Amino acid sequence: MPLPPWPRPHFQPGGGDAHLFYKLHGDFSKPPTISRSKYRTAGIPGGIEAVQLDRERDAVGFRFGFEGPFVERMAAEHPSVLAAASATPGAMVLRGTIPDPENLDYFRDIVGVITAFLDGGATAVFDPYRLDWWTPEEWHERVFDPQAPAPLAHVAILLSEESVPDRYWMHTRGMIKFGRPDLSMRGLTEDLLPGAEEVFNRFIAGQATGARIPEGKSIDSDLVAGDWACHHGGSMDDPDFNNLHVEIRRSAET
């Protein structure tokens, strides 16, 4: 049976490689049967490696994601799910690189595989690029059930206060899954936050479908006052992004 394609209608080559990293917690001694038709997947995509971790033997890898900002939301909203994930006998890491993908079929496939494992008894999914966990219910509702890429569900928009009073930094994490840079805007006042989020959502959707942001591109939005433009920078080692990023700043700051 042919699988539904997930195209990138605005694809421009050379934008970057896609990186995936998910960690599932559960008992993987008897992996589930992954139905091609039910889960809309051709299996684990080429370039993605599946590694099983044992709770005792691989203690460091097993505990990755259970500390710091990774668990703040889960601890507040789903403490029982977090406790169940921590108590599982093992974990499975799905991690690897897809070279400059011209479509999102690889993403369709990994979504289907993870859904099959969740339906088979896995308790939760850790997404380090997004700095958060998924419960099985959240994954179904926001990721699998829409039957479409849903990039806004896979990219986190984060907001933090800057050292200057009443100024905020907004940035994303997760665009690396689509082989595109993350986004950053600094020095935002409170009145600019809705407009900045609208700009981010537009760039997230555009890049996920394959578009690339030209160097120096100006921001076209009535909700963001001022003369803002896009500038590429950063490195893959930057812990704020684990990715390259586009800094959107006022022209006077360039």
Image (cartoon, rainbow, N blue to C red):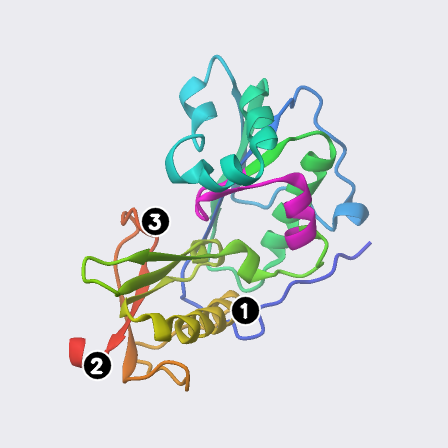
Q: Amino acid at mark 1?
A: Thr
Q: Mark 2 vs mark 1: which is more N-terminal?
A: 1
* The one of 73 and 17 positioned closer to us in this rendering: 73
Q: Which residue is at 82% across, 54% downward? A: 1
Q: Which residue is at 35% across, 62% downward? A: 170
Q: Secondary structure at mark 3?
A: loop
* The one of 176 and 188 positioned closer to us in this rendering: 188
Kindly identify which numbered label has been placed on residue 209. Answer: 1
* Mark 2 vs mark 1, CA separation in Å: 28 Å
Q: Quadrant of the C terminus?
A: bottom left
Q: Mark 2 vs mark 3: which is more N-terminal?
A: 3
Kindly identify which numbered label has been placed on residue 242. Answer: 3
In the rendered image, the vertical position of residue 29 relative to residue 82, given as above or below: above
Instruction: Tell me the quarter of the picture where residue 85 sits.
Output: top right
In the rendered image, the vertical position of residue 146 relative to residue 220, given as above or below: above
* Mark 3 vs mark 1, CA separation in Å: 21 Å
Q: Secondary structure at mark 1?
A: loop
* Residue 5 image point, x, y percent: 69, 62
User: 251 left or right of 3?
Assistant: left
* Residue 79 image point, x, y percent: 56, 32
Q: Mark 3 vs mark 1: which is more N-terminal?
A: 1
Q: Amino acid at mark 3?
A: Asn
* Residue 4 image point, x, y percent: 74, 60
Magenta highlight range: 126-143
User: 119 left or right of 190?
Assistant: right
User: 153 left or right of 216?
Assistant: right
Kindly identify which numbered label has been placed on residue 251. Answer: 2
Disc 3 residue crowd, few under 14, some 14–19, many 20+, Cα 10 Å: some
Q: Nearer the viewer, mark 2 or mark 1?
A: 2
* The one of 218 and 209 positioned closer to us in this rendering: 218
* Residue 150 image point, x, y percent: 61, 61
